[in-house]
Image (cartoon, rainbow, N blue to C red):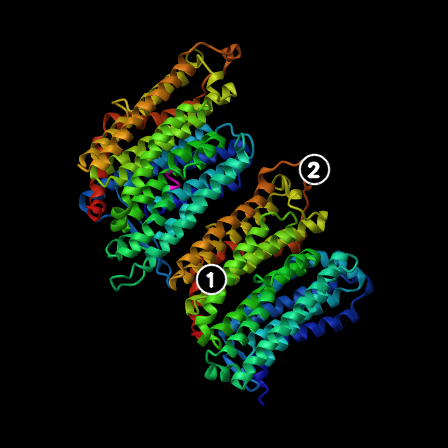
Amino acid sequence: MNFSNFLLMRHEILLLTITLLLLIGEIFINKNKKSSLVHLAIFLFGIHTAIGFFAIDECSIFGGSFQTNNLIHLFKNVLNIGVFTLLLQSADWIQEKIVNQNRGTEFFILLFTSLLGMYFMISAGDFLMFYIGLELSTLPVAALASYETLKRKSSEAGIKLILSAALASGVSLFGISLLYATSGSIFFHNIIEVITSTNLTILGFILFFAGLSFKISLVPFHFWTADVYEGAPISVASYLSVISKGAAAFILMVLMFTIFKPLIHTWENIVYIVALATMFIGNLFALRQQNMKRFLAFSSIAQAGFILLGLITGTQLGTATVVYFILIYIFSNLAAFGVVQAISLKTGKENMDDYNGLYRTNPNLSLVMMLALFSLAGIPPVAGFFGKFFLFTAAASKGYYLLVFLAVVNVTISLYYYLLVVRAMFIRKNDHPIPFFKNKLYMRLGLLITVIGILVLGLYSPLYDYIYELSSIYN
Amino acid sequence: MDILSLFVIVPVLTIIALLFTKGLKQARLVSMVGSIFQLGMAINLVIAYFKERAINDSIMVFTKDFVWFEQFNIHYSIGVDGISVALIVLTTIVVLAGVFISWKMADLPKEFFISLLVLSTGVYGFFISIDLFTMFLFYEIAVIPMYLLIGIWGSGPKEYSAMKLTLMLMGASAVLMVGIFGIYFNSNADGGALTFNILEIAQVNIPFEAQKLFFPLTFIGFAVLGALFPFHTWSPDGHASAPTAVSMLHAGVLMKLGGYGVFRVAMFLLPEGTIHWSWFFIILAAIGVVYGAFGAIKQTDLKYINAYASVSHLGLVLFALLTLNKIAWNGAILQSLSHGLLTAMFFALIGMVYGRTHTRDIHKLGGLMKIVPFIGAIYVITGMAYLGLPGFSGFVAEMNIFVGAFQNPDMFQRVLTVLAVSSIVVTAVYILRLVGKIMMGPLVNEDFKNLPKVTWYEKTGILLLLIPIVGMGVAPLWLSDMIMASLDPFIKGVL
């Protein structure tokens, strides 16, 4: 065992170090200055994010149970930027509501542990590592979801999340055990060699897919989503819908394009149906939501349906468009959740009606929200348009014209409810609008990053080319 | 900097400048300067185009090509022919007139002018694109500001109208997207690489089965914007609720994107599909022509009258395109230009009337000629031009369309042509009745005696539109020649 191998796990080790540093740091921080913990956490995580950008070698260590390559490396960096932005956006909330209850450190520890789990999950080289990562990424989030202990809905969210997550991981585990039974190995590279399309492997795949569908909240495994998002603190809902969903979609894609590739004629049909159901149910249920968190929950279900359009192809084009779309989706959704968070923190208002007349009092927040919603809806020239267009191109490249047609019908439906929010902010008048307020530095920074992402990611084409190049690894 | 990209860059720079303005005065000044600059660029473009055309006989001139997304073979690829030059000039005129007409926009002026310029950026980008991807991108950029423009500054049931318009147009663009994918993935039918470039795809023989499947999608995707019956319903509501300048830009320019797209993409790239499907869509277009005209008779709101008239006149554009005849096509382009100017003029005048009398109901208006003779006189002139009086632009366009349409000896098409021609009579009915009622008739409301005078900025806006209307009517040949010369490569495919 060579110790330089550990350097290849730089992301994981650094994150673990940060978590421990925060734990120690809390001891030394003056009781009256507890809020400086937040600065420390953001500072440390910022360094971690920056270091992540240094190039890394492709490798497979620990007998193949941990592997990494440039695409995985890129994706970890994307997750880091997402979490960093999320930290900036929730800094005020933590300072005002959490730190004085002496629960600040735990928040960061739980959050970072969950992220660590995702690193392991997407870097897994066998099903054991994968499963550990999956659990490690889910359990802390359940604790985070019930972080606002004084609210009943928050506790309810925690319980709901942990019960459905437990069920989901049980189902996946059953699927994994069937795969083990047919192939005799839990290592991905062994399974790829022996897997064939038999009834047992197909059943194993379906169970595995169902388990991961819980995390991505694909229909019909989406029931927990809206309730958990509504009850959980906004930062946690944002984390669930952005980081957690992105990572799960990524690993699902990787596994489907590698070890389940021989079953493509089976899973094509499954993905087709699930994609349609997810888009339609997500969009139709979003139409009548009043609470912004529930609204974004259903919108993010629908977005997951769009991701499946790239997944169905099983090609390099599919990989590239899915990663690109997730990247854009992370920024767009973070921006939307950021605005909801800023308003909720200052005024406690979370309903769409409360946003009436927002533009006239808080023009900047409204513009950020509008950009985010346009990006989610896929309106040019913001990034979402490119993400969606390319995803649909990927699906059309395999001849799924009907699916693309139904997907664009869904884009139109989704445009309706995104415009409802725009209507509230820009067109509707309000006798008691949300008064003008100035956000603190962290929040402004957090929103700025997302806006830059939304504006630049689409128009800057070398990024897509880079992702496309890296995607060749799975084909 | 090349002469065409400036049409995208200048509006964008104007928008950035607008971000730093405060209040109405600065905002309108900046928009006016930007729009005047664009008009100058357009005039320069026409001169440059004639010079270039004399030495260059390729389909598109001033072409530039930059690779954008290499993997999809998406390029930022631009170029113009006589048709797009004419439509760009139309756009600059209407935008500038729109800025003048909105001189007193009190509510959120900065945002208003920004949205207006975003819309015009989309329109310019659309007209100069020869890459399907960028074309589609600019198409959507042009549509989405309409939601805010109607929703915030509109009147009446503005929320409903804005949502209806946006969803119908975006739904159409969704259909169009599938059509574009169909074209894109068949663009390698002759063994080349997949491409979005219109000129390259035109060289490819796309299989007939694919053309049959994707022509209706592409056609409907664009034609909804051109108010194809029965997908026209967004247009009357949208026009009626929109503020004056937006109605002008929308009916005058944005709806032309539909006819242009049908011509440039659907018919040019899918000629066999066009021939296969033209009988069906020409029926719809003919119904639209007649239906729009009768609809206009029935309305009492000035804006609704004009909106239905637009459905009728733009139906004529689609009708002419579908006759697959060169003279009729020339008429279609001329009709696009003529209708763009005339309908913008009508909406400007309606805005001026409404701004003074605060009503658009024809029963509550009357005798305005004596009080505001400027508006009255121009209204009469525009009305005459609209119903096709020789000497104005409308006559030239409709003459070409009907002469061309009648050249086809096919009985089916002749019957439809007769049907469409009958709309001229109906147009005369609603225009003359309208002029007689609100301009010439007795004064119905004593309060109207003190209506404010027409201001300089209103007059400027009106004159900007009037000059080309008369110009096109008096000297149509140079324009017609410019268009005719550009039609040849397109007509080859469908003959």
Residue A133 falls in image quadrant: bottom right
Position of A354 relative to A128 (above/below)? above
Subunit that carries the residue with mark 1? A
Q: Nearer the viewer, mark 2 or mark 1?
A: 1
Q: Nearer the viewer, residue B329 or A363?
A: B329
Q: Numbered disc 2: what chain?
A: A
Residue A116 visible at all: no
Residue sitting at the far bottom: A1
User: Pointer 1: what residue?
Assistant: A309
Whether B352 is among the magenta residues is no
Up the image or down, A153 lies above or below A79; here it is above
Using residue B116 as the reference point, say whether residue A441 is left or right of it: right
As helix, strand or loop, the secondary structure at mark 2 comes to loop
Note whether A289 is above or below A237 in the view shown: above
* Quadrant of residue A386 within the rendered picture: bottom left
Residue B62 placement (x, y as % from top left):
27, 48
Residue placed at 60% from the left, 63% from the top?
Answer: A221
In magenta, the rendered stretch is B224-228
Front residue of B314/A317: it is B314
Q: Are marks 2 and 1 on the same chain?
A: yes
The residue depicted at 44 percent of the width and 72 percent of the height is A264
Counting the numbered discs, the total is 2
Q: What's under tag 2, amino acid-wise?
A: His
Report, in whole angstroms, how far the alpha carbon at label 2 lies from the one at label 1: 43 Å
Q: Which of disc 1 and disc 2 is earlier in sequence?
A: 1
Please tell me whether the stretch drawn in magenta is mainly helix, strand or loop. loop
SS of the residue at dot 1? Answer: helix
**Amino acid under label 1?**
Leu
Compared with B405, B298 (above or below) is above
Q: What residue did someone put label 2 on?
A: A432
Residue A299 numbered mark, or none: none
Task: Residue A465: give x, y in percent of width and height.
Answer: 42, 65
